[in-house]
Image: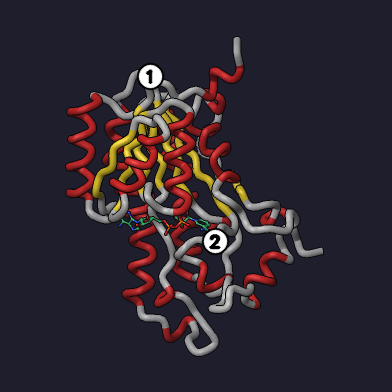
Amino acid sequence: MNIIDHFSLNGKVAVVTGGAGYIGSAVAKALGLAGATVLVCDLKNYDEVSSNLRTKGIKSLGYYIDVSKPEVVEIISDKIKKKYEKLDILVNCAGGNLPEATTSREKSFFDLPLQEIEKVVSLNFFGGAVIPCMIFGKLISKNSDGGSIVNISSLASIRPLTRVVAYSAAKAAVNNFTQWLAVHIAMNFSPKIRVNAIAPGFFISSQNRFLLIDQNGYLTERGEKIINNIPMGRFGATEDIMGTVLWLVSNASQYVTGTVIPVDGGFSAYTGV
Ligand SMILES: NC(=O)c1ccc[n+]([C@@H]2O[C@H](COP(=O)([O-])OP(=O)(O)OC[C@H]3O[C@@H](n4cnc5c(N)ncnc54)[C@H](O)[C@@H]3O)[C@@H](O)[C@H]2O)c1
């Protein structure tokens, strides 16, 4: 047995939601480099990212998707079914926080507009996990070779972070749902279909830059606090997440389901002492 072959995704078809984002585009590249056909699904920039992958010799197409709208996700799922006759892998990267649902010195929890909290829960829990798992997951459930679903959660799901109330709660729901679905699918459909989550720590992207870096490019007070609590002493980079995703979607993790793996430089293990 060649253990490296267990990581190969040759012949696999993969959907990456939020596939044009900071983490999603790195995930798409990792899956493509391992041999998968990668379908980059996003609200924007999906064509740009998929054509960039094609220049690297990766089989890829881009699709407009709004993960919050089941009817739109259904259309893409039908297209994939017609074109590829199967789906093997789903990585849910769509998600993020909103400044309007974030507390500050001026705005406490009691002042947050409920509709902004609902928007963040809707994007991260329903759009970020439930809806694509229901629609693309159904396609995977019919795959006799098995399959793998990975939800991109957050460290905020394990230990709620100050200020991002709705985001932390929604990602905690994603973890619970991931475990529930892993059990449901293994017991009712196929033990060869696995569902896991990754909980990234701090990666600087458009959604959290305002919290970590100030207008002059320096760390904010919060950014500095965070760095001091990361044992590895740095924020994450996209390469830090690629190997974990590859492991979870490939046969290399064939006995792993219902887990939430932190990729956080040790942040969640550190008590601060
Ligand atoms: N950046 C971090 O530090 C960090 C940490 C922990 C978890 N995460 C999670 O990782 C995932 C990716 O985040 P990122 O940092 O790459 O952010 P990002 O903003 O770069 O990527 C998010 C992508 O999701 C897409 N998207 C948003 N709403 C959508 C919708 N309704 N339908 C389809 N696509 C939609 C956006 O267009 C964007 O391309 C998110 O779920 C985020 O919560 C990020």
- Which secondary structure, mark 1? loop
Where residue 101 sits, quadrant-wise, is bottom left
Q: For the residues carrying marks 1 and 2, which lies nearer the camera in this image?
A: 2
- Camera-nearest residue between 233 and 72: 233
Residue occupying image coordinates x 49% and y 85%: 108
Q: Can residue 271 be seen here?
A: yes
- Looking at marks 1 and 2 on the same chain, the residue that comes earlier in the sequence is marked by 1
Q: Nearer the viewer, residue 183 or 25?
A: 25
Which one is nearer the viewer's eye here, 223 or 152?
223
**Residue 65, image x, y percentages:** 25, 50
Which residue is depicted at the point 41% across and 70% down? 98
Tally the numbered discs. Answer: 2
Q: The N terminus lies in which quarter of the figure? A: top right
**Dot 2 corresponds to which residue?**
204
Q: What numbered label is drawn on residue 145?
A: 1
Quarter holding ligand 1: bottom left
Residue behind label 2 places its C-beta within 8 angstroms of ligand 1: yes
Front residue of 176/195: it is 195
Q: Amino acid at mark 1?
A: Asp
Image position of 50 (left or right of 97): left
Q: How is the image coloured?
A: secondary structure
Q: Residue furthest bottom?
A: 106
Q: Residue at x 40, y 28 (%)?
A: 36
- Residue furthest to the front in view is 55
Instruction: List x then y, in percent, for residue 14.
Output: 36, 33
Using the image, determine if residue 204 lies above or below residue 106: above
Label 1 neighbourhood size at 10 Å, few (<14), some (14-19), many (20+)? few
Estimate the spatial distance between the alpha carbons at disc 1 and disc 2, rounded to whole Å: 37 Å
Residue 159 percent across, percent down from the top left? 60, 61
Percent position of residue 183, x then y: 45, 35
Residue at 42% in and 37% down? 149
**Quick one: SS at disc 2?**
loop
